[in-house]
Image (cartoon, rainbow, N blue to C red):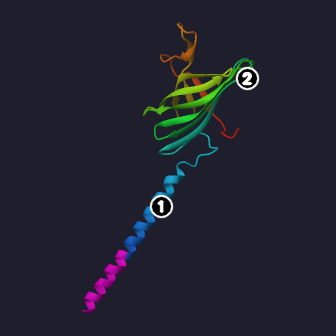
Amino acid sequence: MKMIKNTYQHIAIILSVLSLCTACQSSAKKNTGGDTTQTKGKKGKISKRTQDGCYLYTSGNKMQDTLYVQLHIQDNKVSGKMTNEIFEKDSRKGTLTGTMNTDKSINAIWAFMQEGVKDTMAVEFRLNHTSLLQKPLKADAATGRQITDHAAPYSIELKPTDCNK
């Protein structure tokens, strides 16, 4: 009888320890899941499911033309902002919405304002370890509007920049 009582006590202790371990692991999983989204102000920080980053490209004679892209990637969904400011010309400012493919290419629609007029344009990017690459734009022969040159390589390199600027 005493042996059975000791066996029950041992089983009770083992079950208590197992339940405590399970509770700790469950709590740890819940806490680490939220950490992947805490990327404010970081340059191109990558996590398993979420990535935030800001990128800048400067060009022109005096490097006064700027292209700024702020991205938020959740799983394969992409959102963000894009601003193209050409020195002494009208700027284009707007939002990006799209998807990221497994090869890290991004297909997005840029909805922007220019001279008080709303417009949209398809844009293509590729994310790599050190920068964001964009396919260049070209003029559509039929409409005269700028469009992404889908046949061109990713030739515009935007470097990581501080998102708090």
The image position of residue 161, as x and y in percent, is 65, 36
Q: Quadrant of residue 145?
A: top right
Query: Which residue is label 1 attached to?
Result: 28
Image quadrant of residue 15?
bottom left
Of the pair 84 and 115, the residue shown nearer to us: 115
Find residue 102 and report its horizontal and vertical position in percent. 42, 34
Looking at the rendering, in which quadrant would you find the C terminus? top right
- Residue, x 59% and y 46% (percent of image)? 39
Decide if residue 104 is in sight here. Answer: no
The residue lying at 52 percent from left, 39 percent from top is: 73
Percent x, y of residue 63: 72, 22
- Label 1 element class: helix
- Circle 2: element type: loop
Contact between marks 1 and 2 (CB within 8 A): the answer is no
Q: Residue furthest top?
A: 142
- Cα–Cα span, label 1 and label 2: 48 Å
- Which mark is drawn over residue 64? 2
Label 2: how many residues lie within 10 Å, few (<14), some (14-19) or many (20+)?
Answer: few
Whether residue 120 is visible, yes or no, is yes
Residue 108 spot, x, y in % from top left: 51, 28
Relative placement, left or right, of 87 versus 106 is right
Residue at screen point 40% across, 66% down? 22
Counting residues from the start of the chain, the first of labels 1 and 2 encountered is 1
Residue sitting at the far bottom = 2
Name the kind of residue labelled 1 in the image.
Answer: Ala
Secondary structure character of the magenta stretch overall: helix
Are there few (<14), some (14-19), or many (20+) residues within 10 Å of tag 1? few
Label annotation for residue 105: none
Residue 132, compared with residue 88, is above or below; it is below
| Near-viewer residue (128 or 114) | 114
Point out the stretch of residues depicted in magenta: 1-15
